[in-house]
Amino acid sequence: MAPESASRQRIVKSTAVLLVDCPDAKGIVAAISTFLYSHGANILHADQHQDNEAGLFFMRVEFDLADFALDAENFAREFQPIAHRFRMRWRFQDTGKLARVAIFVSRYQHCLVDLLHRHQIGELRCDIATIISNHQDAQALAEFYKVPFHHVSVEGGRKQEAEGAQIDWLERSAVDLVVLARYMQILSPAFVARYPLRIINVHHSFLPAFSGAKPYHAAFERGVKLIGATSHYVTDELDAGPIIEQDVARISHRDQVEQLIEKGRDLEKAVLSRAVRWHLEHRILFYGTKTVVFD
């Protein structure tokens, strides 16, 4: 490799992320920072948030593992007294362990193309394990990016059978995260329960407005001046999971449904890619119906 090319390669440090949420109290930041320092951690980034109305505290700390003395198992044992004292929910994530991602898609491919391109240029640090579709339209694209493609037809009355085949493929592929890139099928509660808060969807509307199958048509009929897109975690309730990211675009009386759809596609792929990236970088904490997304 030429020196110039080598200098452009991304240098990825060996780091870990600690995510914490608990009732707000004095001394939480001091306890966490002292614990990390005492075991050789060099804190690279730290961010926190208080929900004063709910009385909750949230924190994300990323630290260098070069001189850190604890592995994941020992971290859990040593950190437990602090977690118990402050009644914490917490997660320790080694950023060097890349998540394995499955992308579900139907016929619209703009979100899929965007995710595959961002992954190829290094913006999404993960392994894309498979692309699963109820149509064969995306097979050529999967082959171009050298991602295994799996076609599962979802025909009337055979949805349970189709989901069984999908789940079998996900388990054999050891998938950690499922991304619905304009996958135009409703997942069953049994499917969602297998991947709690590990399924990210993009909805072509600024939720909670215009949920359902044809939000651009509904927005056009209502005469709105803004359209939007929303990325959210999938729950049993349709289009009602915790929201991760949203964006909007201004429209006018001159725009017809076709223009709304065209402008909306840019929003859809942007909010979905941001949500996926933030999930992969362990930047999201959730509580109730809300999320905290750290910068």
Image (cartoon, rainbow, N blue to C red):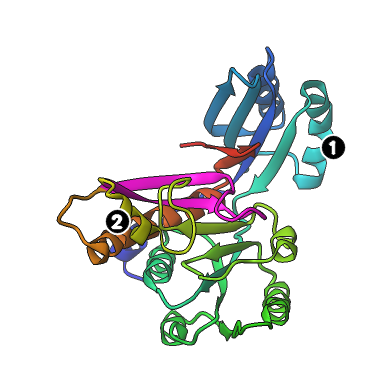
Label 1, label 2: how far apart the Cα atoms are: 56 Å
Tell me the quadrant of the picture where the N terminus can be found: bottom left
Residue 231 drawn in magenta? yes
Could you say where residue 241 lies in the image, as x and y percent from the top left?
A: 59, 48
212, above or below 1, in the image: above
Could you say where residue 80 lies in the image, as x and y percent from the top left?
A: 83, 32
In the picture, the disc for residue 77 is 1
Q: Residues within 10 Å of mark 1 (few under 14, many from 20)?
A: few
Identify the residue at horizontal 18%, vertical 50% (top origin).
Answer: 252
Check the image and name the residue furthest to the left: 254
Compare residues 255 and 164 and report the one nearer the observer: 255
Identify the residue at horizontal 47%, vertical 86% (top origin).
Answer: 139
The answer to whether any part of residue 9 appears in the image is no
Relative to 259, 65 lies left or right: right
- Give the residue number, with chain letter if any, for mark 2: 220
9, above or below 173, in the image: above
The stretch of residues the image draws in magenta is 226-249
73, above or below 90, in the image: below
154, above or below 251, in the image: below
Q: Main secondary structure of the magenta part?
A: strand
Compare residues 152 and 252 and report the one nearer the observer: 252
Residue type highlighted by circle 1: Arg
Q: Residues within 10 Å of mark 2 (few under 14, many from 20)?
A: some
Tell me the SS state at disc 1. helix
Identify the residue at horizontal 51%, vertical 70% (top origin).
Answer: 183
Residue 6 drawn in magenta? no
